[in-house]
Image (cartoon, rainbow, N blue to C red):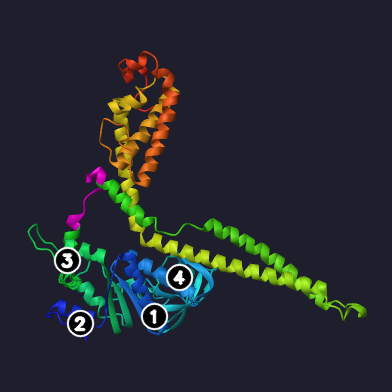
Amino acid sequence: NAERHVSKPQCKHTHALHAYLQHDRISVGFDAHHTKSLLLGDWWAAVVSGDDAIMLAGRRTDVAELNMCGHVRAEAAGYLDGPELDVGGVPMRAGDKVMMLRNDRRLGVCNGNRGVVLDIDPDAHTMHVRLARGDIEVPVRYVDAGYVGLAYAMTVNKAHGMTCDATMMLGDDLLYRELAYEAMSRGRKENRIYMSRTTMTELDLRLEDGPHARTIEHDDPIDILAAGLERRRNKQLALDSIAVVPLDAWATSDLVAERHRIWAVLDDAPPDRTADIAALTKSRHQAEQKLDQQRRSVEQLERRKRPRKQRRLPDVDLMTARHNLSYFEQRADRLDHEIAALHASQHRRASHLVAYRARQVEFDAIGDVLDERLRQQTNRVVQDPPTYITKSLGYRPRDRAKDRVWVRAIVEVERYRLEHGVTDGRTTIGPEPVDLEPWRAWCQVTDALDDVAEVLRPERKGVAARQAPTPTATIGIEGPSLDIAF
């Protein structure tokens, strides 16, 4: 079978991959989202069929996302019940598959032990877990330390020595021989590989060892995968360390483009529905109170003794009370469904944020670098206004209130020029863009400049506005006259 090809070091990895392809063990998605959807679908099908299936990935961020997706799927399918316990920012309920992340002799667990949560006490922050050797009570000290994690997915290194029924490996651009061998030899029944076409492109770019080396053709993903598996881990780590370039050395246009790219990824997260959940929970509490009131009313009407003459007639009061009770029951059920849907959306949001936490850190770091460059550029423009500033805003006003308006306008202009790559010194913010989003930003800055011009117009009409600018030292103001929060 395909696993035998992988286990022989002398065999070509291409033969093993072709064997995997013939047995439908390799799936290539259009992008990362599509690839993970394919992986999750096959994993869930294996779980439903009763197999011990594990999702594997090389990066912890991918593992965190897959674990959260596995938790959400299990919850939506009714596999989880009981209260929820937050362990290191990860929600857990009875029925979740978990893993012990630290050796503890007193508790009798080892790093990597897997089990299923049987019961959770959210008040005491403890959980009852069934391991292979028996049931244990996980104490609060172990839970609060974050030593319990979801076990729907794990890193390939964590899976070392483990055996299960099926594995689904998410391939990335860090493929190397040792990692692939570990991942493709864990499952007894089957082992699958999932790659995206964007990952194929990144992997192909990383395979070039020199400026004159021939790259792999993009048309054959098997050749790219095989070349990736031929790499040794120590060589890949060396290449990764060489490829790291400080953000301060990046060009401003590259930083802006990278920030837009990261923001497009972060913006895919579902919206924060915390306020909606709080509002619906309040409505559900009110509905429960009215529901209890209607139940008591129905019980009282059912126990009452009606006059003998009215017993043959329909009990209108009881019918009305039962109708109201049915209405409030339906309303409570509808609110429960809406709250459950919002919680599922929040889980997907948490999964997305956890998975792309490194991207968020990178996004913030890029923002800090751009803010510092914007601050330096603004100071230069304030000290020595270029022509595109003096034409639209005039020279720096003497009045302190107008000076604040003038400086704020320069900040908006320089921010727009930086974010949209405007380098033309003849115009303030460049020509009118064609695309919608840049056009909206252009219109906002244009309207702001018009408002500033109205404020500064009286001083610009005088003779002093046509004279050379007075040095800042004679005015008594050095640099911007206000502390601007960039």
Q: Where's the N terminus, which quadrant? A: bottom left
Q: Which mark is residue 45?
A: 1
| Helix, strand or loop at mark 1 | helix
- The magenta segment: 241-253
| Helix, strand or loop at mark 4 | helix
Seen from this angle, which residue lies furthest front?
Answer: 434
Please name the residue that numbered disc 3 is placed on: 234
**Res. 88 in view:** no
Residue at position x 51%, y 58% in the image: 273
Q: Which mark is residue 19?
A: 2
Please name the residue that numbered disc 4 is placed on: 72
Q: CA distance from mark 4 to mark 1?
A: 15 Å
Q: CA distance from mark 3 to mark 2?
A: 27 Å
User: N-terminal of the two: label 2 or label 4?
Assistant: 2
Q: CA distance from mark 2 to mark 1?
A: 22 Å
- Looking at the picture, does residue 18 appear above or below residue 197? below
Q: Kindly identify the amino acid type of the residue bearing the numbered disc 1.
A: Ala
Q: Kindly identify the amino acid type of the residue bearing the numbered disc 2.
A: Ala
Residue at position x 34%, y 24% in the image: 478
